[in-house]
Amino acid sequence: MFDFRLKVFYTVARRLNFTKAAQELYITQPSVTKHIKEIENYYQTKLFDRNGTKIKLTKAGTILFRHTEQLFKIYRNIDLDLDSLKHDNKGTLHLGVSTTIAQYVLPSYLAAFKEQFPDISIKLTTQNTDNIEALLLDHKIDMGIIEGYSKRRNLNYLAFAKDEIVLCTHINNNLVKTSSITLNSIGKLPLITREQGSGTLEVIHNALSKANFNLSHLNIELVLESTESIKNYLLNSKAFAFLSIHSIYKELLNKEMKIIDIKDFEIERHFYLVNEQGQTETLPLIFQRFLLTHSQR
């Protein structure tokens, strides 16, 4: 319904990267550039300032970004409100949610969902990714929301939000005296990790393996079964951990923790909605549509 060129602009403005925007939109980078040029020609103004490979919004670009954000929110609400008229929105929805999402990402979505669908009750089960998938296959939950992506047979995975996993530690930890290190250097650091079966651990291992880092070189000091336990340990030690950026916002804001950049290495991932292939139940589909229309993928 809305102009695709505005969606291209909106994606570039959020990502501040033409290549990543092209990947997200499943189009080529020249196509992204073409759409941006067409909008700039239409409004007779520059939307981005370019400095080598880095870009930032101009004043005009900031204004357009603010309006497109409001516009897309209206479109999302139109789609959801009209779609909700087709269904009897009552009953109980059984959700299985992996721990990081349950603690740091989902609560705001749940509050908005309950405001729009007050007659739908939600029963929440929190487990690691492996357990959530098992519960789904055993028909003990209606839908899962997970951090990993194991591609189990008979399950359907749909990305709904992006996340970044960062290396972090206590703000006063001087074991690393610079704000940036090389990938090979992490083998010297005492690391705290999640347990086997954790979606976060799976994503970290996959990213390190793709970067040709030997996982046996990791110096694992301790394995803990929750992000909160890891954060509390970090705040009382000289250890390090790979954690979701969502999980440490408060600690970064309060200057309790810091991020250590790893040169030429980053871990980006999606959070996934997961359900059984061919699922037709109404309540999971309503919740799925709600998340997809309220998140920025």
Image (cartoon, rainbow, N blue to C red):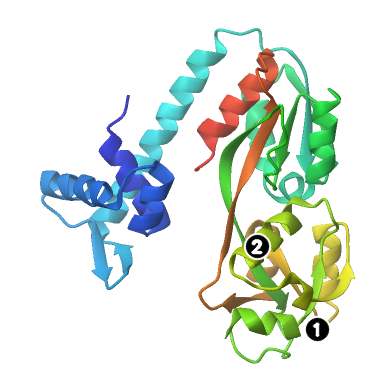
Instruction: Give coordinates of residue 221: x percent, y percent.
Output: 87, 76
Amino acid at the residue labelled 2: Tyr
Name the residue: 32% across, 64% down.
56
84 sits left or right of 90 in the view: left
Q: Which residue is mark 2?
A: 249
Mark 2: few/some/many CA within 10 Å (<14, 14-19, 20+): few
Judge whether 258 appears above or below 291 on screen: below
Q: What residue is at 37 percent from the left and 59 percent from the top? A: 17
Rendered image quadrant of residue 51: bottom left
Do we see residue 73 in this rendering? yes
Q: Residue at x 69, y 17 (%)?
A: 283
Q: Is residue 254 visible?
A: no
Mark 2 falls on what kind of element? helix
**Amino acid at dot 1:** Lys
Distance from disc 2 to disc 1, alpha carbons, whole Å, reads 20 Å
In the displayed structure image, the side of residue 199 where residue 5 appears, left or right: left
- Secondary structure of residue under mark 1: loop
Q: Nearer the viewer, mark 2 or mark 1?
A: 1
Which residue in the structure is indicated by mark 1?
A: 238
Q: Position of residue 69 (x, y in %)?
A: 39, 42
Q: Earlier in the sequence, mark 2 or mark 1?
A: 1
